[in-house]
Amino acid sequence: MKRKLATAHLLVMGAGMLACSPEPSLPKNLRGIEKFDVVIRNGKVIDGSGSPGYLASIIIQADTVAYIGQLDSTRTATLEIDASGKVVTPGFIDAHAHGDPIKTPEFYNFVAQGVTTICLGQDGSSDSKGGFGAWQASVDSIGPALNIAPFTGHGSLRMETETPFEEELSEADMAMMTTELDHQLRLGSFGLTMGLEYVPGRYSGRKELQALAKIVGSYQGVLMAHIRNEDNDKLEASLDEFLSLGEWAPVHVSHLKSVYGEGTKRALEIISILTKYESLGYRVSADVYPYMASFTGIGIVFPDWAIPPANFNLVKKARRGELEEFLRNKIAQRNGPAATLFGTAPYAGRTLADLEKELGKPFEDILIDDIGPRGASAAYFVMDDSLQEALMTSDYVVVSSDGSPGMRHPRGYGSFGKMIETYAVQGDYFTLEQVVHKMSGQTAEIIGLKGRGLLKVGYKADVAIFDPAKVKVKADFQHPHHLTEGVDFVLVNGKLARNNGEFVEERNGSLLRRE
């Protein structure tokens, strides 16, 4: 049920309208300005803190919120936006996103939802070829349409060692990793992400992870992880492994889920694990995307002994029967071949069951002979609605998309719109104030984004303006790249990125540095 928020300080008029008081005196630094840069008039301000919304106008000067309150109609601005009948919120922050700001700097899929900042470098994989500083300079020169909060990928660090697929790294390799991590944190990386279910992160042990966690903590950075195993029967051990690193740095669980788990009771058991580590004084958090299908490489269904560094061709010859049996059992456990929907060519849009009919052979043979453990990515319908929705309502949990401009999964085009449309407007899960908090202020606090995430004087002017009733998600699994509709205006660093429902060609995002 929606938690009721206190509204004692608001005057209610008529059918839910909020009273406007006369304009007070403007701050001294604004009184002599004849024309402001931006004025947003008469919107319901939901400031991202979780506090009740209120009617106000907003003045933006350069890239910063300069004033929030009542404003006389004689005050003018170079850009004036009438937000009557709409809400004005902080731009949303995606705690776990994917994409390449050099190849696709527009990020239309995110901007259309009101997202103004995304966290990249996820699941242990960060793109900083040629050096992190050179990558930063490239992104700076291109200028993305929204803000990028970069993280360092543990797997990317490990791949630069002499033996990335070994469980025990040499002292020299560990020194290389710790030195490079320190370097990237000094240059402004927000922390370290881990992909402990993926190659090469799956080979790392506690000693290695502790050494890296200590460095992240020394910079007040954040540890994020795709934990080692999200299957329901392995979840406790995987969460314990990662959350115990909270002794040295804040720990954040990426796309928290239980594969095969069911029910609200199970969700509460999972949340209790987070509570256990918070009770030790650790900073604990997580993110969830509002879809019941995951998306990752098909290697997730193959056994450890069939993925790198194993030679798959040799495995096929030496252990074919064993591999076939493993895949049959694994796919059955994951709700059968109809629950695997491919998202990459040449099979995009078709399920594993579709391919059985089309190719006329069992799905295990298709996986072995036609695809292999590195030949495709897919959506997997393996999650329970009631469990995931209960996780979503936890105070530990914020919103992410785990999506990108090109991924064939609607989460990259609809996660934030769906939180508004399905869970705040249509459903009885959150008030609008609560869901905005999960998508802005709370996320900013978790990742250490200073001066963003709230509509507050002195904060950067990342803003979304919309009528909540008109926000409509158009992406689905058949059409995953349809843009969300209804977010009319988006400002990034005080400049328009979306103007009355249309994208603005000029890009005003920034590559952020941890302060």
Image (cartoon, rainbow, N blue to C red):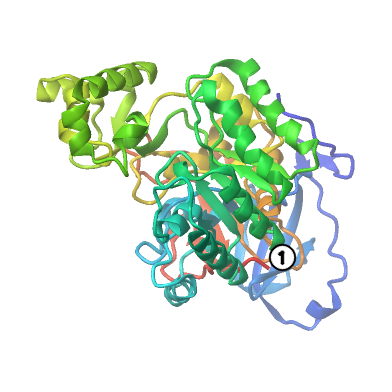
Q: Where does the image place residue 459, in percent across and percent down from the top left?
A: 71, 65
Classify mark 1: residues with Cα within 10 Å, few (<14), some (14-19) or many (20+): some
**Res 288 seen here:** yes
Q: How many marks?
A: 1
> Which quarter of the rendering shows the C terminus?
bottom right
Residue 198 quadrant: top left
Q: Disc 1 on helix, strand or loop? A: loop
Residue ID at (19%, 36%): 314
Going by the numbered disc 1, the residue's amino acid type is Tyr
Quadrant into which the N terminus falls: top right
Q: Is residue 114 left or right of residue 293?
A: right
The one nearer the camera, 411 or 167, is 167
- Residue 109 lies, in percent from the top left, at 42, 51
Question: Where 340 sits versus 453, above or below?
Answer: above
| In front of the other: 138 or 18 | 138
Instruction: Name which quarter of the figure residue 484 lies in.
Output: top left
**Residue at the location (27% across, 37% down)?**
373
* Residue underneath mark 1: 459
Is residue 238 placed above or below 157 in the rendered structure?
above
The quadrant holding residue 214 is: bottom right
Which residue corresponds to the image point at 60% horizontal and 66% vertical from the top-left?
182
Residue ID at (33%, 33%)? 305
Task: Say whether residue 425 is visible.
Answer: no
Residue 434 position within the rendered picture, expressed as x and y whole percent measured from the top left: 70, 39
Across and down, in percent, residue 65 comes to: 71, 67
